Image (cartoon, rainbow, N blue to C red):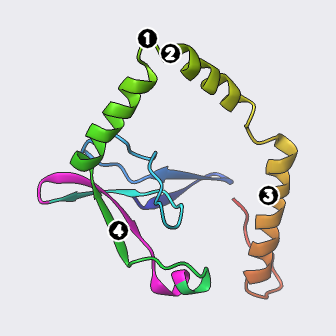
């Protein structure tokens, strides 16, 4: 899904390109090769998830990644349903709740997020064109 950039006053806002087609796992799947979010794609009348990765990016990041990876939703959902039914089976429910509680403590801390934002800003400044004016920030 491509992102559109809308400017409202001084603030910039990103919003995903809207679609009328249903994708059960929209925005949740990540590519197993590069880790990027997979996009929804409608092929032959059926929903798919895809990751497109340019060969230049793959070479730069030292990743062996095909130009496009497609995952049909109909191949994924039965496995996901089976896994969820095992996790939420009455006999396994208490261990699932403990796993969910343990996962709550693994959230990023605000100072870690601020440090990551500062690193990204530094990289952007490094690649920004040299001019007398500062680039407009969103």
> Residue at 75% across / 31% down in the picture?
105
Q: Is residue 11 left or right of residue 25?
A: right
Mark 2 packing: few (<14 Cα in 10 Å), some, or many (20+)?
few
Could you say which disc has been placed on residue 116 in the image? 3
Distance from the alpha carbon under mark 1 to that under mark 2: 5 Å
Residue 35 is situated, as x and y percent measured from the top left of the image, at: 54, 61
Secondary structure beneath dot 2 equals helix
First-in-chain label (3 vs 1): 1
First-in-chain label (2 vs 3): 2
Q: Is residue 64 left or right of residue 77?
A: right
Q: Is residue 44 left or right of residue 57?
A: left
> Residue at 44% across / 51% down in the picture?
16
**Image vertical order of residue 29 relative to residue 36, above or below:** above
Residue marked by disc 2 = 93
First-in-chain label (1 vs 4): 4
Is 99 or 3 nearer to us in this picture?
A: 99
First-in-chain label (3 vs 4): 4
Distance from the alpha carbon under mark 3 to that under mark 1: 41 Å
Query: In which quadrant of the rendered view does residue 118 lie?
Result: bottom right
Residue marked by disc 4 = 69
Highlighted magenta segment, given as a residue range = 44-58
Residue marked by disc 1 = 90
Foreground mark, 2 or 3?
A: 2
Q: Is residue 57 left or right of residue 2?
A: right
Is 100 or 27 nearer to us in this picture?
A: 100
Check the image and name the residue furthest to the left.
44
Residue 64 is situated, as x and y percent measured from the top left of the image, at: 49, 79
Check the image and name the residue furthest to the front.
91
């Amino acid at each position: 899904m491509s992102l559109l950039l809308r400017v409202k006053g001084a603030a910039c806002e990103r919003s995903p390109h809207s679609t009328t087609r249903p994708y059960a796992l929209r925005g949740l799947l990540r590519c197993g090769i590069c880790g990027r979010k997979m996009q929804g794609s409608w092929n032959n009348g059926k929903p798919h998830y895809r990751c497109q990765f340019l060969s230049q990016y793959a070479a730069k990041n030292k990743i062996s990644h095909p130009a496009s990876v497609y995952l049909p939703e109909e191949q994924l959902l039965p496995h996901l349903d089976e896994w969820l039914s095992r996790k939420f089976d009455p006999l396994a429910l208490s261990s699932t709740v403990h796993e969910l509680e343990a996962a709550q403590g693994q959230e990023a801390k605000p100072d870690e997020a601020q440090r990551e934002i500062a690193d990204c800003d530094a990289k952007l400044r490094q690649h920004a064109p040299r001019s007398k004016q500062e680039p407009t920030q969103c």
